[in-house]
Image: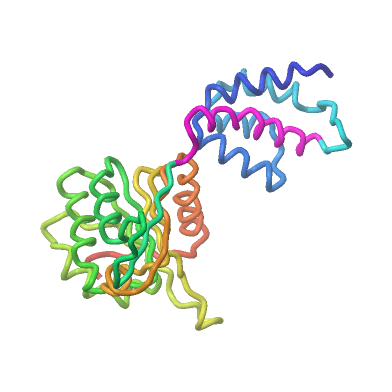
Amino acid sequence: MSSSWIQDLAEAIGKSTDAELFALEAELEHGAVLNAETLGRLGLPTGEAVHIARKLESPAAPRGLPPGREIEIAVQAIRAPRALLKGGPEVQIVCTAPFSARVSVRTTFATSIETIRTAKQDILVVGYLFTEGARQVLRELAAAGRERAVAVTLVGNRLTEHFSMLKSVCDSRGCRPNLLSREADPTDGLAALHAKLLVCDRHDALITSANLSSHGLHHNIEIGIRVKSAEMSSLVDFVQSMASKGELKALSWNA
């Protein structure tokens, strides 16, 4: 078969978002077949997806690579120049420290507040521990929902244990976040949701070792990064997949 399938694939990718391409690349890495269904998830019209899928059914595989792996390499190669033109992801180092580090880093607390205040559509917060010491951050989340109609979701480990504190911080007259909890595993008492994330609008993410607590935000030594990239949407997708598989339990504020 001629290399025209690469041209068709390049044209299809040119119409797709970075998030769609990253999701496709992840599927291919896990053995998915690039067919009309997977191409359709790039937002292509059905007829165009079927046309390209037929050309991709049996491309010649140089170097003895299986066709699926060859297509994966083609997707990566076609996507790479786009990332270069955009300058790649924007990354900041973020730290908590009880001393002046004298290096160019942002504080966890200030970065959390700034990230929340720039959100326009949705905010996802994932944490292991929530305490009174994070009251200002939690109030910023509530204000984002109340004042800008931002959809806020709070995901925590055994969140029911922090329910009273959350109720005291999030005024019942305001816009309270959606709550999802990973409850205790009856077969493993040490298993936990230990991740700490703040993702805004599916592209602006703070990934940190810091809990939402006074020590995590102000007194411990914590390290993280803030990344602005379309690929951060995969963090949201991962949490949503946890919920769909029953790993997370929705909580009601009226409980």
Residue 76 within the segment the image draws in magenta: yes
For the C terminus, the quadrant is: bottom left
Of residues 181 and 107, the one drawn nearer to the viewer in this rendering: 107
Q: Is residue 214 left or right of residue 248?
A: left
Task: List x then y, in percent, for residue 4.
Answer: 74, 16
Task: List x then y, in percent, for residue 117.
Answer: 23, 47
Q: Main secondary structure of the magenta part?
A: helix
Quadrant for residue 251, please give it: bottom left
How many dots with numbers?
0
Residue drawn at point x = 49 percent, y = 37 percent: 88
Task: List x then y, in percent, for residue 86.
Answer: 47, 30
Colour setting:
rainbow
Residue drawn at point x = 29 percent, y = 52 percent: 152
Residue drawn at point x = 84 percent, y = 31 percent: 61
Q: Is residue 100 left or right of residue 231?
A: left
Q: Which residues are magenta?
A: 67-89
For the N terminus, the quadrant is: top right
Residue 128 within the segment the image draws in magenta: no
Residue drawn at point x = 77 percent, y = 34 percent: 70
Indicate whether 166 appears above or below 9. below
